[in-house]
Amino acid sequence: MSNPRVRIRNVQHDRVNFVLEGVDIGFANSLRRVVMADIPTVAIDIVEIETNTTVLADEFIAHRLGMIPLISTNCDEGMRYTRDCTCLSNCKYCSVVLYLDVSCQEGGTMDITSDHLQVVGYNSGYRFTSGPAYSDPASDGGEELSKRGDGFGNPVGKDDDSVPPVLITKIRKGQGLKLKCVARKGIAKEHAKWSPCSAVSFEYDPHNKLRHTSYWFESDERAEWPLSENAKEEEPPRDDMPFDFNAKPEKFYFEVETTGALSPKEVIMKVTTNSG
Amino acid sequence: MNAINRYELFVLEDGEKPVEIIEDTKIPNAVTIKIFKQDHTLASMVRSELLATPCVLFAGYKVPHPLEPAFVLKIQTDGSQPPVQVLENVCTSLIATFSKLADQFKREFSARELDIQVEEDPYGPVGTNSTSGAGVWGAGNRRDYLDF
Ligand SMILES: [Zn+2]
């Protein structure tokens, strides 16, 4: 059994940078893969378009909507997968419904952004089309709803001026977009839009002592391949040092950057407590 | 319409066995194990832990076909322990490693919790035009390269 050691170098609201030691490379790489593709979040999965007079095609907009990060705090426990739910298509336990209804009346260009998406409760009586008001489809009640965090299902950064919204499309006078989205729980193995991470950097052996890679160079390898910041953490090799063919990578440098759907802390804690 | 559900890539079907054990008849103390609905994430981790076990002579895995969500793991031991037993031990030890890792992260995060609050303006300047305070996406200033 290995004894992992972790040192966090930096935490911010959307990223965490840490050094992992005491495990082998297979373990470290699996940790990277789990962070990227095994943590459930909510993302728009079904889009019903009522009006689209924008310049973009329906499927183009549907795809863009899917990529918008939605707040997914405690999604793992706060929501069911639709495939495990007792409902027929979707219900409040396995989905979040969002509406968007924007039209441009004045001259000039108008942006439709993720800020225009509005989460609507299942029993709010909101009318999408001329049909009956939306009501809760039959499904068994559960604890899920109470476990969800604040603003669950809302686009990340909505009602926060310091966070730029995601641009969906631009419209001019007379154009409009009206649609309904069903957001569901999923993981990034199904579609990358469910990944809680926008980038995960992973590095080991910054001096290439283990020769796991060979650098292409014009004339001077050292000058053309500047060392990364992580190289400061390790002893640089002496030029007369013989190659140690038994050496193994020992320190792994991670930076996990999230989309905002989950906090970096939640992502890391979910990985380490659930993957067993 | 006839597409299979995307989640069938990683969710076991009703009644589907997660593992299939095929004893090797030609090599002593060897076994081939097929693990369904799992990929390199589990396979590579298990293999590297097996290779770190002294009684293991051989451990390797392959994904026989990229469209079939399963991998095959081959283990040979020196005979001091049956390969299936070794695999079981390795899995238990991996789970233990993960819980140790969780403790490490928990401690590090709680030590770091304050740093987040001290940090000024976590989002940094938004866009290039931050003189108005709200940045390019703030109300009133929504010009970009297409609006000239
Ligand atoms: Zn449901």
Image (spheres, grey):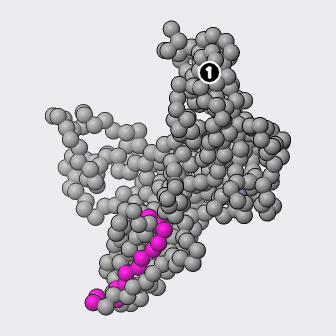
Say which of A24 and A146 sits in front: A146
Amino acid, disc 1: Gln
Task: Name the residue located 58 percent from the left edge and 60 percent from the top edge.
Answer: A272
Lateral position of residue A227 relative to residue A30, left or right: left
Task: Name the residue located 81 percent from the left edge and 42 percent from the top edge.
Answer: A133
Q: Quadrant of residue B66?
A: bottom left
Is B14 rendered above or below residue A32? below
State yes or no: residue A197 in magenta. Answer: no
The stretch in magenta equals B26-39
**Label 1 crowd (10 A; few <14 / some 14-19 / many >=20):** some
Task: Name the residue located 25 percent from the left edge and 34 percent from the top edge.
Answer: A224
Q: Quadrant of ligand 1?
A: bottom right
Q: Looking at the figure, which quarter contains the C terminus of chain A?
A: bottom right
Lateral position of residue B72 relative to residue A151, left or right: left
Give the percent coordinates (x, y) of residue A40: 60, 54
Is B41 rendered above or below residue A208? below
Residue A221 in sight here: yes
Could you tell me which chain the residue with mark 1 belongs to?
Answer: A
* Residue linked to disc 1: A175
Say which of A85 and A155 sits in front: A85
Q: Quadrant of residue B79?
A: bottom left
